[in-house]
Image (tube, grey):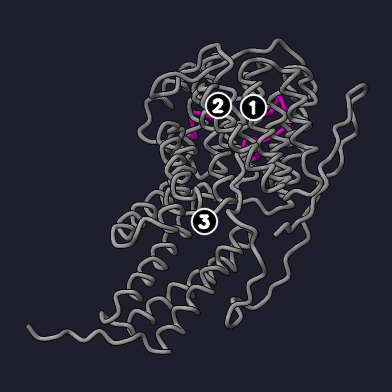
Amino acid sequence: MPHTFSPEPSFDSQALLDSAEMWRTAARTEIARGDWAKAEAALGMAETTYESAQRVVGSGSSALERKLAEGRALCIVLRSDIELRHWRLPSAEKRLDEAYQAFKRVEDGVIGAELYRVTARLAERQGRWQSARAAWKRVVRLTDGEDEVALGDALIRLAEVEVVIGNDSGANAVLERVESLVRELDDGLLRARAAAVRAADLESRKMYAAAWEAWHDAQMSTTVAPVDFAGLLKLRMAGTAVWMNPRQGFRLIENGYEDLVSANHPDAKGLAYHQVAVLALAVRDADAAALACVGSRRCRGGFDDTSRPMLVQALRQGGHTDAADELEAEEGARSEASEGVLETALNAAAEERGLKWSQVGTEEGLLALCAALRRRDGVRVQIRVEGETGWLVEDNAALVRHRATLTWDAPVDTLGTVEPPRPVVAPTPRPAPRRMEEPEPDGGEPTLPRIATRTRWW
């Protein structure tokens, strides 16, 4: 049998691989920073360079071929990550399917952890909690003993899912492991995230005073935090505040939204509208909840399975039975025809709250809804989602389940400044973050301590 010659990788092929990996790292950095133009440009350069390296390598070096396959698969995962953060869920899922196909040709290592991490986060946004739980467990297995920071992130997310599905013992077991890791790493941010999960767990069991203290523990556990983390924390705290002081809850949503905007969070409006809907149901304002669901739906391009069950029930509670039936019968998460039905049902409710129908889904509409809800106080209602279609009944568990999409998509490591081999894009001035006007404080409300933040923690 003739001997098959496998040439050693040339300097050019190795240099191309190194360059491609540098571009991919730059793309990952810009994704974490929220600079989407630079992320897209760097990712495009990484993909192009991997293709060039593949042509140079050919089919002679199995080691280099494996590295190329891993790198190209990781680029697909990053594409899915970008789509996911912008709530373009169908596109994210399509990219993820492509990554799974590529994954078949590489080893179950770093690419596996990245792949299952995005899989878990997509499942969370779609409300598929058991699938998310299985994926996070896979990430824990792949990172255990390999990367303590990535392990800590996966454990926190797993604990959050355990709380959502009501597995208190499972959540406690995972949190005990996290707290041990926190002591070892002396990581204040990880400590804050663990305290936030404790708070969510207490809230799910209606222990609101204890949950409120735990939320403050989360705020005070780290003196420096990413702005988007601070914003999401405030939105989640609002879910506890509404049971004790509704006006304070809606004020927290406004403050949290302001932080998310300053951090260039791609789903800032969608997250805030979604939380307004949950809190509006809690104070029994069904029309405001329905308007907030429409706002969230619009911000997310119509693909918002997590708000749709709330919208159907809010319409029913507000007496808009025909609109609820129409929405419940529509195929998929998006229907242009339902827009007209919703406008007919809710236009008057929008005008009563000082906004035009066209403003629902905008920042002006969000602030108008919050202002209207702050002016009222009412009996709290407890809700829960049951079954495949997400039917709402009176129970507290759904408040936690609906808010579970407010988890922080943490960078999985401490990101350094990456100098790409050539400019990614011509520098363009970024507008200064627009800060909302600080509203006048409502009389008698306690003032919350603010987390000290800086825009770039990595």
Indicate which disc, 3 or 2, sits on the residue closer to the N terminus.
3
How far apart marks 1 and 2 lie (CA) works out to 7 Å
Q: Is residue 54 above or below residue 203?
A: below
Query: Residue tagged by mark 1?
Result: 200
Task: Look at the image and say whether residue 348 sits in the magenta stretch.
Answer: yes
Q: Give the amino acid at mark 2.
A: Val
Q: Can you say whether 21 is above or below 194 in the image?
A: below
Quarter of the figure with residue 163: top right
**Residue ID for mark 3:** 82
| The C terminus - image quarter | bottom right
SS category of the residue bearing label 2 = helix
**277 shown above or below 122:** above
User: Do residues under tags 1 and 2 come within 8 Å of each other at their CB atoms?
Assistant: yes
Residue 263 locus on image (x, y percent):
71, 53
Tell me, yes or no, whether the two marked residues, 3 and 2, touch with CB atoms within 8 Å.
no
Q: Which residues are magenta?
A: 339-359
Displayed quadrant of residue 103:
bottom left
29 with respect to 129 (left or right): right
Q: Earlier in the sequence, mark 3 or mark 1?
A: 3
Mark 3, other Cα within 10 Å: few <14 / some 14–19 / many ≥20: many
The residue where tag 2 is placed is: 163
